[in-house]
């Protein structure tokens, strides 16, 4: 029975851990940006949204763009 080890091309555990934490922090910021944008736009009246040229159907897409998902 043969065992193989997975190589990470010389990347240390500390570097991988730091990259993981950085990715998680970035994901947190994106989620927060999405949530805040969506909530702020959802709280506007239809008239205020119309003044901005936004329909209620566009709120999710605009929030996703603001968070960098699109």
Image (cartoon, rainbow, N blue to C red):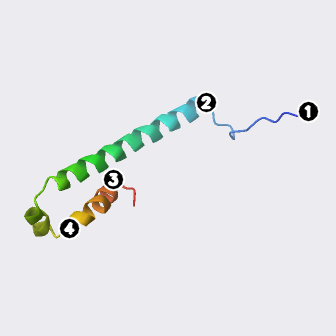
Picture residue at 10% right of the left edge, 68% below the top: 51
Q: Residues within 10 Å of mark 4 (few under 14, many from 20)?
A: some
Q: Which residue is mark 4?
A: 55
Give the SS element for disc 2. Answer: helix
Mark 2 and mark 4 residues within 8 Å of each other at the beta carbon: no
Using the numbered discs, state the Cα–Cα distance from disc 3 to disc 4 in whole angstroms: 19 Å
Q: Which badge, 2 or 4, is on the more N-terminal residue?
A: 2
Using the numbered discs, state the Cα–Cα distance from disc 4 to disc 1 in whole angstroms: 63 Å
Using the numbered discs, state the Cα–Cα distance from disc 1 to disc 3 in whole angstroms: 48 Å
Q: Is residue 11 above or below residue 44?
A: above
Q: Which residue is mark 2?
A: 13
Mark 1 and mark 2 residues within 8 Å of each other at the beta carbon: no
Q: Residues within 10 Å of mark 2 (few under 14, many from 20)?
A: few
Q: Residues within 10 Å of mark 1 (few under 14, many from 20)?
A: few
Using the numbered discs, state the Cα–Cα distance from disc 2 to disc 4 in whole angstroms: 48 Å
Quarter the N terminus occupies: top right
Q: Which residue is mark 1?
A: 1
Q: Is residue 10 above or below residue 47?
A: above
Residue 19 bears which disc, if any? none
Q: Residues within 10 Å of mark 3 (few under 14, many from 20)?
A: some
Give the SS element for disc 3. Answer: helix
Q: Which badge, 3 or 2, is on the more N-terminal residue?
A: 2
Q: Which badge, 4 or 1, is on the more N-terminal residue?
A: 1
Relative to 30, 48 lies left or right: left
- Where residue 53 sits in the image (x, y, percent)? 16, 70
Q: Which badge, 3 or 4, is on the more N-terminal residue?
A: 4
Labels 3, 4: front one:
4
Labels 1, 2: front one:
1
Q: Which residue is mark 3?
A: 67
Labels 4, 1: front one:
4
Relative to 16, 35 lies left or right: left
């Amino acid at each position: 029975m043969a065992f193989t080890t997975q190589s990470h091309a010389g990347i240390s555990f500390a570097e991988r851990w730091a990259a993981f934490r950085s990715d998680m922090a970035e994901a947190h910021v994106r989620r927060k940006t999405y949530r805040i944008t969506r909530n702020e736009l959802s709280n506007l009246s239809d008239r205020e949204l119309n003044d901005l040229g936004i329909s209620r159907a566009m709120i999710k897409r605009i929030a996703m763009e603001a968070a960098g998902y699109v």
